[in-house]
Image (tube, helix red, strand yellow):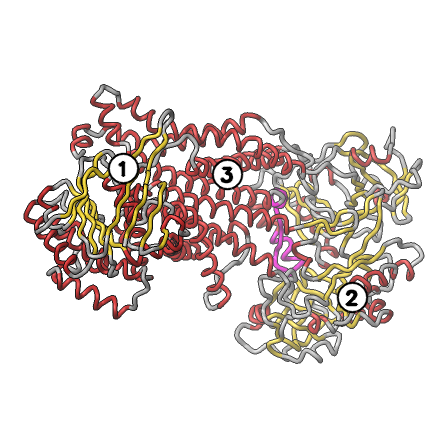
Amino acid sequence: MIKLSNIDKYVDSKFQRVFILKGIDLEIEQGEFVTLMGPSGAGKSTLLNIIGLLDDDYVGDYEFEGEMVNKMKEKQRHALHKKEFGNIFQAYHLIDELTVYENIETPLLYRSVSSSERKSIVAELLDRFNMVAKKDLFPAQLSGGQQQLVGIARAIAGKPRVLLADEPTGNLHSNQAKQIMEVFAELNREGTTIIQATHAEENAAYGNRLLEIVDGKIEEDKILIK
Amino acid sequence: MWKNYIKIAWRNLLNKKGFAFINIGGLAVGMASALLILLLVQHEWSMDRFHHKKDQIFRVMNRAEFNGEIHVWGSTPKPLGPALKEEYPAISAFSRFSTMDNLLFTVGEQKISSDGAFVDISFLDMFDFPLLEGDKQVVFKQPTDIVITQDFASRLFGSADALGKTVLVNNQETFTITGILEDLPSNTQFSFDYLVPWSYMEKLGWSDDYWGNNSVDTYVELNDQSDPQVVGEKIKDITKRHSNTEETEVILHAMPDWRLYSRFENGEIAGGRIEMIRLFGVIAGFILLIACINFMNLTTARSEKRAKEVGIRKVVGAGKMALVYQFLIESIIISALAGVIALGIVQLILPYFNQLIDKDLFINFTSVWFWTGLLGFVLLTGVLAGSYPAFFLSSFMPTKVLKGTFRKVNSKVNPRKILVVLQFTIAIILMISTLVIQKQIRHGKDRENGYDRKNLIYIPLTDDVKKHYGVIKQELINGGTAESMTRTLSPLTEIWSNTWGIDWEGKDPDDKTVFNRFNIDEDIVRTAGLTLLSGRDLDLDRFPSDSLAMLLNESAVKAMGFEEPLGQLVNDSDTDYHVVGVVKDFIMTNPFEPIEPLILAGIRSGNWTNVAHIKFNPSLSTANALANTKEVLAKYNPDFPFEYTFVDEAYAQKFESSQKSAKLAASFAFLTIFISCLGLFGLSAYIAETRTKEIGIRKVLGASVGSLTSLLSRDFVLLVVISCAIAFPVAWWAMSQFLKSYAYRINLDWWLFALAGIGAVLIAVLTVSSQAIKTALMNPVNSLRNE
């Protein structure tokens, strides 16, 4: 599904070129649950952004479902991102001025989903995450875990095939973190491909593949057997 | 989607009330002033454009050369209109228009004096002045038929029906009211309470066929197939053909141009009020632009707060255009709110504005055009204000803004700073203009005008006053009311007649210098307080032949080239006058223009006088003197109400229009400064807020409040200083142009510029430092704790 070949990402400063990613070769199949681990600054988030089509400033080839992403026009790439990817962040990144309901609804607005369909999708998601009673609250009125649940609900509202999570539990207590990871596992069982970046060893256990990233390179790539 | 946009716009406004207040308030004030100006522009634009024959109707103007200069003027000979219609089939109708001032109308006990005009029968066919009652075809059947406006009808008859009633005019003639006109709209140049047919003028014997007497306005209607250019070329020489002596050409002036393009230079249209309209349009645009700049600056300054939202929206699938739309809609919502407030402000201020510009503007809330216009205006403002922020905000990269490290680098030159400079440049230019205009007016007012305006009035000479003039004068002077009194052709502050046809010994036959005329009987020097340079005043008691005597002003002596003016003979209209005195130049017309040569001729029979000037006894209070005068006049002029004008007030009138523009300029300057400062205030508040941490650290390290305040204010003040540097040359150029139109004018002193510059800097410092001091005084413990 996703195939990266020889991806380099660097920034040029005055006297030298600093590589953030160097020679990344990676293939991810549909339905995998991949965990990226590594120290801060290793390039995990950058790799996620490249995979999620949010960053196109790199060298190398990126194939998605057989199509060359790096040869695509901005418009096509944007359409592809909208169709296939959902993003989840460490800091949740909900829109403060919108309620829970409206936050979840937002991606559907950009996908021109009809009003009645929107209602049923959002209702279903609220129900699934037990948030029906909180649908009219604003993000500031929720706990971190609840906010992240809204974040997940929003990410999957558009029914993407790939879910990208950047330190999704970094700001959460362990109990809340566990709840989130279980949701991920369940989504993965339903067929969603998940790629998460994390520091936490215990989170990796929910996935079925672990990539160790150090200094912009894939140091280790192992299959986890449960 | 829309609901989502509107919701988030609304919640953003509620969350940041101060920001919203400055944004909407500034925009509303800007929009209100632009709306006011647009109302004025619209009014000027609509002048006499409501006539459905506006493209076929032309005013016939005279054009002739004097002393190498081609003049164009509107008064034409009486036979011109009929001759045009008769000789040219392209001209389907004509009407002359000759004003009549101060006719006395008597209905029972009711006496009203009022102004109207003689017109030809096709007048009401040509122009759209609809009749409420009466039939347009037959209203002018008899010479004594009269058509009056509804307003005049109700003044004469109250609520009673006026049609068919009779009215006594000037105690001479009984007229029958054959039509009631709808009151004239405010957007016409015509002004009359009543119309009487030309046949009445013929009946009075006032009509003549003399092609050299330019005294009436002539309007023609071309049939709809004629090309005005072709017709204009054909009729050009009609006056020359009918008269052996006149060398005037006639030209056609199109109706839509009457108001806006009425200035002729060298015989061609050179402009007119359109220039003022354009200037106002530009000023309206500037004020609106300044208000929009506030919006842009405050919105982009707050971009860090919106950056996260932009990033999130992009990640969840928003395209760039979707975000551009979102922010545009947001700014249109704000502009709509501002528009509603602006409408309220306009309604509130309109009476004062009307007073200022002496107009009767109003908002026609029932007009579809008004609402479409307003909608367009709101949309335009919203897009103008919102486009830059929209593209700016929507261009954020989500990977950068969501990492949390997003911070706009405060570069040396950024659009925000440029916009602030632009705002203040405009504001400073307007400030300088205001100062220059004020000073120029003061300059004109302080100019020595050459006569004594104190305790001096003039009254119109009605037939009765003329008849009893000798007794009236005697009673006023003997009774101690007046010191002296004189009859003149026109008020001291006006010129009613001029000529190039006078002759004197040694005149160059090609000399066509125009001399102003001012007929006088006697005692003008004493009454008006003129300065006699040589010779003596006219005195009919001692020198009965003084009805053929003449005074000259200095400029006239110079124009005639007399070395010894006294005793010279000057010939005007086949009459020789002997010059008995020379008076110092005095200002009768425009106080900003050089004084023109003036001949003050005695009143031999045939030299008309129209007003009498009365110099009150200075030992009497003005109120008493007026009461006495009224009493005397009531005795001899019982039919007319006591009418009088103070010469000093009439003189002050000369400054009214320039004073109005000065007031307008001052208001605009104040508004631009106000709106600019509002923006600066918002911006400084925001900058201070984002720098609280820095200030806290500096304070902990030992910085004083003073140094912190200057640190925070310095940048803004620098921007205003840069604005001065740009504004000064522009203002200097613009004001030099402005002053060129005044012959008698001030110099552009450097201190005017310095004053405006210092003023702007001071205002900016006051605006910015309040925020800076507030931030500098904050306890660093508070500002650092939350990090």
Quadrant of the snapshot with the N terminus of chain A: bottom left
State which tag comes first along the sequence, 2 or 1.
2
Segment colored magenta = B630-653
User: How much space separates mark 2 and mark 3, taking CA atoms?
Assistant: 45 Å
Q: Earlier in the sequence, mark 2 or mark 3?
A: 2
- Where is mark 2, residue-wise? B227
Determine which residue is flagged by label 1.
B405
Check contact, mark 2 vs mark 3: CB within 8 A. Answer: no
The disc numbered 2 marks a residue on which chain? B
Relative to the observer, which residue lies in front, B31 or B703? B703
Q: Amino acid at mark 2?
A: Asp
Q: CA distance from mark 3 to mark 1?
A: 37 Å
Amino acid at circle 3: Ile
SS for callout 2: loop
Residue B259 in the image, given as x and y percentages of width and height: 66, 56
Same chain shared by disc 3 and disc 1: yes
**Would you name the residue on which mark 3 appears?**
B426
Residue B643: say if magenta.
yes
Classed neighbour count for the residue bearing mark 1: other residues with Cα under 10 Å, few (<14), some (14–19), many (≥20) = few
